Amino acid sequence: MGLTVCLACGGSFALAQVFPPRQPQALPSPDPIPGAPGRLPMQPAQVPQSGGPPGVLVKTIPFAELLGDPTKAFLQIGNMRSPMDTNFQFGRALAGRIAVEKFTHELGNGKPVFLHVNGLSNPPLVSMEGQELRLQFMIPVLLFKTYYQDYTGEGDGKLGDVTAEKVTVDVYFTPTIDQRKLPTYRTVRVVVTGAVKEAEKCMYFFDMLFPVNVCNAAAAYLKEIKPDLENGLREALLHPQTRVRFEQALWPYLRGELLMHAGVNPAGPFQVQILEARFSGPDYVVGYVPR
C-alpha cells in the first residue's frame, strides 16, 4: 500500500501520493560561446599543410642543400706530375678532372724554362647571387714551381719560385626543374680571379746575356690558365654523364627528406610521387604524396 498524507487547502481535503526522491543528475555543459575563453571539444590531430590541394604535402628545400655538403667540396689546381692533376669535388657526384698544361718559355740561349702550378682551395663560401647559387673557392697560395733546362736538382735550384695569393674561383649554378619535376641545374659559369705576388727576386741571367723574369712568366702563365680553368670546369659540369651521376646521387637524398617530412621511415618500401614542383628563388618547392 502506498503512503498517503492529507493536505489541507481551502477547507477541502485532497490526497497526494509521495514518491521516493530522485537521484541527482549532472547538468549538461553549455555550448562554448564564440570568442569567450574556455576549453573547446577535443578534435582529431591533423597533419599541417603548407599549401596545395588537400592531402598533398609541401616541402621547401634550398638548392644549396640539394647540391651537397659544401664542407666536403674542394678544387685542386696542379700539374706537377701530370696535366690531369687538376681535380674538383663540388657536390653530389659533381666531381672530375681537367687538363692544365705546364708553361714553357725558351730563352735566347735555346734553354727552356718550365713552370708548373699547384694549389688547394678551402671549402667554398655559399651564397645566392640573384637566381644563381654561388660557390666561392679561395686558394690561399697558388705556387708556380720553376725549373731551368731540366728537372734535376740543379735545374730546380736555378730559379726562384713565385706565388699568387688569395686566388678565387667562383662557380655559379642556375637551378631549374627537369621533365620529372626533379631539381637540377640549367647553366654553369666559372670566374677565376687572382694576381701574382711580386717576389723578392724576379730577374735571373743565364750565360750573362740571356735574362728571364720569373714574375712576368708566372703572370703570363696565370693569364693563360684562367680560361682553361673556366672553360674546363664549365664543360665538365655540363657534361651529360656528370648530370646523370648528379641526378642518381640526388634522388635517394630527396626521397629520404620527403618521406621523413611525411613522418614515414625512409628505410621502408614507401616511394614518393611528385605532383608539382618549382623554384622560388633559391628554394625547391615540391608538392608530393607518399605511396
Image (spheres, rainbow, N blue to C red):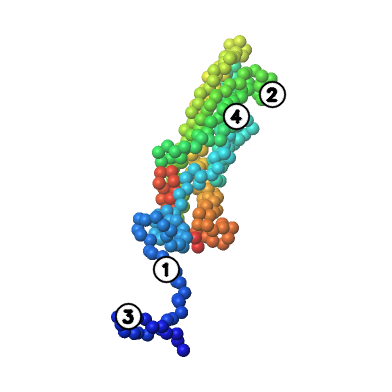
Q: Residue furthest left?
A: 10
Image height check: is 161 above or below 54?
A: above
Q: Residue at x 52, y 57 (%)?
A: 263
Please name the residue that numbered disc 4 is placed on.
118
Q: Residue at x 54, y 20 (%)?
A: 197
Mark in front: 3 vs 1: 3
Q: Are marks 3 and 2 in contact (CB under 8 Å)?
A: no
N-term mark: 4 or 2: 4
* Mark 4 and mark 3: Cα distance apart in space: 121 Å
Please name the residue that numbered disc 3 is placed on.
9
Badge 2 amino acid:
Thr
Residue 42 on image: x %, y %: 45, 62
Mark in front: 2 vs 1: 1
Count residues near mark 1 (Cα–Cα under 10 Å), then give few for <14, some for 14-19, many for 20+. Answer: few
Badge 3 amino acid:
Cys
N-term mark: 3 or 2: 3
